[in-house]
């Protein structure tokens, strides 16, 4: 029988005081609510970044998505599975890079930087951008709700 290998704990956890977690409370103005849109998350590489979740429909309505990416954005919004042609895949990859660069607020990155970043980091950022997950790499809810007892019960986090 072989000995079990001890897995080292991740150095940064959801309770790490260096991670900015929002306080769950009522806000008294629209301005205060807007100020809560930026979140600090931890990526698989251990890197912490500040993000703002993109609203693809609002970005499209405001003309913030480049014309050549509108079709890819619409397909993502509507959940359309496009035939995997070279052109469709290239447009989807470009749209994913665009969304990652737009949502990361600190450190500031350009769309051209995205392919050089760790793939597991950009994969997680894409999943968060497209609402495929709402937890970061260390299991912290991207809005800090993992600290709220009712949320923990709802998501069965303590079982």
Image: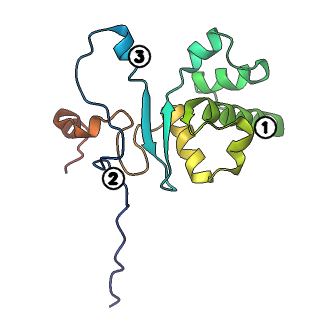
Answer with the quarter of the image where residue 11 lies. Answer: bottom left
Q: Residue at x 65, y 50 (%)?
A: 117
Q: Measuring 31% from the left and 36% from the top, which residue is drawn there?
A: 144
**Image quadrant in which you'd find residue 149:** top left
Residue 83 in view in this figure: no
Across and down, in percent, residue 156 comes to: 23, 43
| Residue 158 tag number | none
For the residues bearing labels 3 and 1, Cβ distance under 8 angstroms: no
Of pointers 3 and 1, the one earlier in the residue sequence: 3
Q: Is residue 35 above or below residue 98?
A: above
Q: Nearer the viewer, residue 47 or 56?
A: 47
The residue tagged 1 is 90
Q: Which residue corresponds to mark 2?
A: 13
In the rendered image, the vertical position of residue 39 relative to residue 119, given as above or below: above
Q: Which residue is mark 3?
A: 34
For the point 48% across and 36% down, which residue is it? 50
Q: Secondary structure at mark 1?
A: helix
The residue at the point 41 percent across, 16 percent down is 34
How far apart are the alpha carbons under marks 1 and 2? 36 Å
Residue 48, percent across and down? 47, 46
Quarter occupied by residue 41: top left
Image-based side of 109 in relation to 7, left or right: right
Q: Secondary structure at mark 3?
A: helix
Confirm whether residue 29 shows in the render: yes
Give whichever of 68, 64 is nearer the camera. 64
């Amino acid at each position: 029988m072989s000995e079990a290998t001890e897995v080292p704990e991740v150095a940064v956890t959801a309770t790490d005081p260096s991670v900015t977690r929002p306080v769950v409370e009522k806000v008294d103005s629209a301005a205060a609510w807007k100020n809560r849109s930026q979140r600090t998350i931890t990526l698989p590489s251990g890197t912490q970044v500040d993000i703002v979740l993109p609203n693809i429909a609002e970005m499209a309505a405001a003309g913030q998505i480049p014309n050549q990416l509108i079709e890819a954005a619409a397909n993502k919004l509507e959940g359309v599975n496009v035939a995997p042609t070279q052109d469709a895949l290239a447009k989807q990859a470009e749209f994913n890079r665009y969304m990652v660069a737009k949502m990361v607020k600190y450190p500031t990155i350009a769309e051209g930087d995205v392919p050089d970043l760790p793939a597991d980091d950009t994969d997680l950022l894409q999943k968060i951008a497209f609402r495929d997950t709402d937890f970061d790499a260390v299991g912290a809810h991207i809005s800090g709700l993992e600290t709220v007892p009712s949320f923990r019960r709802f998501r069965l986090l303590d079982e």
